[in-house]
Image: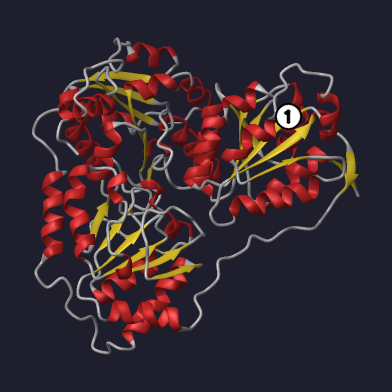
Amino acid sequence: MKTTAAKLLAKKLHEAECRHAFGMPGGEVLVVMQALAEAGIEFTLCKHENAAGFMAEGSWQASGAPGILLTTIGPGLANAVNSIANAFQEQVPLIVISGCVEDGEAQSFTHQIIDQKALMKPVTKAHFQVAAGSMGKIVDKAIAIALADPPGPVHIDVPHNIADSELDVSESRLAVVKSGNWPDGPELDRACFMLKNAQRPIMLAGLGALHHDAGDAILNLCENLSIPLITTYKAKGIIDENHPLCLGGHGLSPRSDGIILPLLAQSDCIILAGYDPIEMRSGWIEPWEAVNAIDLSHADIQHGMHGAAVRFIGDIADSIVRIGQGVLKKHKSGASQVWPEGEISRARDALDQMFGDRVEWGPHKIFAITRRKLPDNGVVTVDSGAHRILLSQMWKCSRPRTLLQSTAFCTMGISLPLAIGYAKTMTSQGTSQSVSNVVVFVGDAGFEMVAGELATLRDLGLAIVIIVLVDRSLSLIELKQSRSNLPNLGVDFGATDLVSVASAYGGNAKWIDSSEALEVALDEAFDMNGFTLLACNIDKQNYLNAF
């Protein structure tokens, strides 16, 4: 059976459960875009390729299928580098499809030509340029590599003269390699012995625990042995953060570090469950004695930030179950008393007080009110900046993947397009979740980076709520200037009439200056058909000593 390279690409992506692609087309990828549409993969036109990459990530967060980013040659792909690099560090399976000219033509034709392989090499897991007859094998490899631990972006360059070429359909597929289970042996025995004899055990869960759906296993082990749980920001909600054993997400707040890092230093058994320290600040370098750590990793991640007495690379959920079974065989009567001096309950109380609501109007009040108003099935995205660190400490997640952010690359401008991709995919899936329950938190500087995507939001008709914290400053950078005894320089900017901007794009928009106004506006926003932007004026001084 004959088909074209572009149609085979689209067919295999559809078989991988992909239903959405995002990007900005050019002449070199028109055939590919048409093939995607014919295969049942809907293309969303964005205003910038960088935002398109973040939307593709949102699609993956909603569906579990690899995101698809489509760009044209040269400047199109170059525009998307930031979002691709973000996917690389944030472990997002992303298929990046770009147009190109084949190598022979590139020797004499230079218009818009750059070395796209070299451009992609440091920010992708793999790069492929399609040659005649090779599309089937390349797509199979790309999907398998993108999904394999740790997940990440893979780039496929499609020469414009190859896209429409005929070839035989290949039915072969490459299976995604599954993580192995921890076999019986001395290393497993040692881990069980360490935990069995621990008086101050603690668990630290990261992104790998999400990849391996380890929430139930973590909850069972923590409850059976009374082990407190700390998570990274990415893993918030792996168990309900209202659980008395959960100490919440940490990693970027110096104030929370003052409570959490001493616990890790005191612990005589730290279980690392899919923990990748790429999310953490420099204060998390060697925060415990290596001899006390059991490192259960989903991938062979080389970082140098900590050591461990036992290390296993494989399935996180299975590894935790195996340890639990080994320990409980020695404890027929149940868990022994741990942290006997009440350190965990005191730490939890201190964190609740430190990052609780405040009386005065400001970011604390905005986050507290929104958390109370947001329905249980709501999902929040948050941009990078001072507000993200405070929100990540305050916001308690009852489920995983309900607070979406960039925690490794920490790029600005992600929260709005991430929410658009998520909401678009949820809407297309016909789920019971209302997309009006998707809320974006973003600073005014981050918002102005991606304000043009309000047009994408308008065209899609999505009822997203956007809360802009307006302080006319790069507040986090100013805080760092102050701590370094440097003068205020290059961080303040003028006021933009954000309400008029959002209204011009067809949205519902209001200025908000009080708790009462926010309460009313959120009630209205969750019932709106179109998108709502709430521009909340705050004082940047509210962030002083906030996190």
**Quarter of the image where the C terminus is located:** top left
Residue 204 versus residue 107 in the image, above or below: below
Q: Which residue is mark 1?
A: 99
Rendering coords of residue 485 (x, y %): 19, 25
Rendering coords of residue 125 (x, y %): 61, 46
Q: Nearer the viewer, residue 115 or 427?
A: 115
Regarding residue 324, the answer to whether it shows in the image is no
Instruction: Tell me which residue sits at (76%, 36%) in the image.
Output: 35
Occupied quadrant, residue 529: top left
Instruction: Tell me which residue sits at (50%, 34%) in the image.
Output: 54
Q: Nearer the viewer, residue 133 or 381?
A: 133
Q: Amino acid at mark 1?
A: Gly
Label count reads 1
Q: Nearer the viewer, residue 101 or 396?
A: 101
Callout 1: helix, strand or loop? Answer: strand
Regarding residue 209, the answer to whether it shows in the image is yes
Q: Residues within 10 Å of mark 1 (few under 14, many from 20)?
A: many
In this rendering, would 23 be left or right of 406? right
